[in-house]
Image (tube, rainbow, N blue to C red):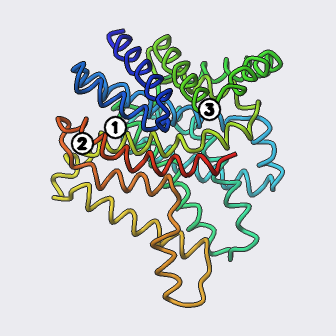
Amino acid sequence: MDLIFPIIIILFLSIIFYFLKLPLILAYIFAGAFSYKFFQFHNEVVEIINNLAMSIVLFFIGFEFSYSKIKNYINQGIFNFIIALLLIISFGFAFSYYISKNIFDSLIFSFLVFPSSSIIVIRVLQKTNRLANIEVPLVIIFLVFEDIIIPLLIGILISKSFFSIAYIPIMIISVFINLKFRTKIKKFLKFFINLDRELFIISLFSIILILNFLFESPIGSFFLGIIVSENYEDYFENELSILREIILIIFFFVFGNYLSSILKIFEIKSIILGFVLFFIITILKSIYFVHFNDFKAFIRSSLTMTPRGEFSIYLAYFLSNYEIKTISFSFIVISIILGSVISFYSKNIK
């Protein structure tokens, strides 16, 4: 409840900066910087960003928990779907049990990664007709790391624990509401979708924050993601995909210094870790998703084909050595870069 006033201030400033014709991400970052610097909302700003980062991750996980999507995945091949899904869920259970040492928490986590696992499976199945069979396990390992391990590490950093038992009843209730009140939900969403795109995103953030405080947890965004999952899928996927990179880069930018401290015993700074991950992931993508005729083309592609969201994560690692006390200045600096990039992409997103 102590964060209500800072949230109101930040949202109010965001709307002001937006109506001053600043790009959406620039409006949010300036609002955070002003609140941090002039209202002395130091820890509050970090906590709000923390909350939003986890909220967006959970929103998209909930959004993927759609009956129609899972049905389409199964249609790709029921046997391959089940085998690959069991493999990934087992991996999720083993990984979570290794950290938590709690069978019950690990089972809950394995059940909750089902939506993300489904996405991974269908992406693999879609690619297998042009990949050799021996490459499929490597692609699965890569996608598990990209779509499950990274979000898992985000969750551990934020909550210091695994998902609460409350997520299961919330998920069941959300699916029931989706099926029971689908027509009314569509009418409700139609009003927001008719808004200007940036105002729609600001409204979505506001709703997510309200739900989070009602539940006293980012679980509110998970709830919202499931409820809207069957409605206007194309709109949400196209218009909100850019939010993934916005939230992830802010999250890693703020908490990258904690990653450095965790790895201190190895004397590895986050800037080095970011560079290594950047190089490894781009090389893997170059090997398994694109075929090259010569070595020069391979190297050139490995340095340029990283998607926007991944590049944002690694760029955030490079910038994560800033101290918290300089975060307001850093926000403004990075917003100049991001504001230009986001504006360019916004013009190309229909």
The amino acid pointed to by label 1 is Leu
Which one is nearer the viewer's eye here, 323 or 349?
Answer: 349
Which one is nearer the viewer's eye here, 14 or 219?
Answer: 14
Callout 3: SS: helix
Using the numbered discs, state the Cα–Cα distance from disc 2 to disc 3 in whole angstroms: 27 Å
| Res 122 quadrant in image | bottom right
Which one is nearer the viewer's eye here, 61 or 77?
Answer: 61
- Where is residue 266? Give x, y as percent: 18, 58
| Res 170 quadrant in image | top right
Q: Give the residue at mark 1.
A: 157
> Pointers 1 and 2 in contact (CB under 8 A)?
yes
**Which disc number belongs to residue 258?**
2
Using the numbered discs, state the Cα–Cα distance from disc 1 to disc 2 in whole angstroms: 9 Å
**Which disc number belongs to residue 62?**
3
Which residue in the rendered view is the most extreme toward the front? 20
Q: Is residue 151 above or below residue 21?
A: below
Callout 1: SS: helix
Task: Classify mark 1: residues with Cα within 10 Å, few (<14), some (14-19) or many (20+).
Answer: some
**Which disc number belongs to residue 142?**
none
